[in-house]
Amino acid sequence: MADRGMAGPDDSEDFEGMRARRAALRAQKPKVLKRYFAVMGVLLLGLAGLGLWLKPSVETMQEAVGRGLAEYARVKTEAGETVPAVTHQESRDWLVAVSHVATVGDESFFCVGGFKVTYCDIP
């Protein structure tokens, strides 16, 4: 039986075999960073695809903003006053969202719609 402090002729072969097995295992290990970027890329592509699918059309956005701002103007006017008209200034179609600027009387409103949700900066 070989002593622990003394290396025999078989020990160097075992050591080289162990190093070769460890190198093979390291080569088979999945690369964590590559996997992370792959998962994040798939998630971002899925989110962008979902945004494109759920994005409202420009016409739908203009109609919805017009109805909402007309109701806002009706609520804000005093009794006996005329309700100011809603005028549409500008609409832009972005990749996953639609933006729209409209005015009611002398107030201007900026609205953004995406993922079936519309937000307007109503004071």
Image (cartoon, rainbow, N blue to C red):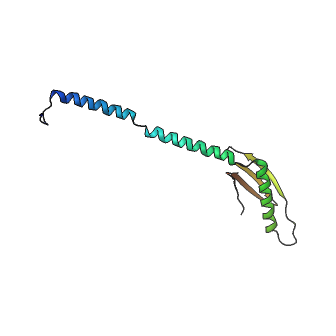
Question: Height in image: 61 above or below 71?
Answer: above
Residue 46 at what x, y percent from top left? 60, 44
Say which quarter of the image contains residue 30. top left
Q: Is residue 96 left or right of residue 89?
A: left
Residue 57 at what x, y percent from top left? 75, 47
Q: Is residue 72 left or right of residue 32?
A: right
- In the rendered view of the protein, which quadrant contains the C terminus? bottom right
- Kindly identify the residue that appears in the image at 78 percent across and 52 percent down: 62
Q: Nearer the viewer, residue 103 or 41?
A: 41
Question: Height in image: 12 above or below 71?
Answer: above
Residue 52 at what x, y percent from top left? 68, 44
- In the rendered view of the protein, which quadrant contains the N terminus? top left
Q: Nearer the viewer, residue 13 or 102?
A: 13
**Residue that sits furthest to the bottom in the current view:** 79
- Kindly identify the residue that appears in the image at 72 percent across and 61 percent down: 122
- Kindly identify the residue that appears in the image at 35 percent across and 34 percent down: 25
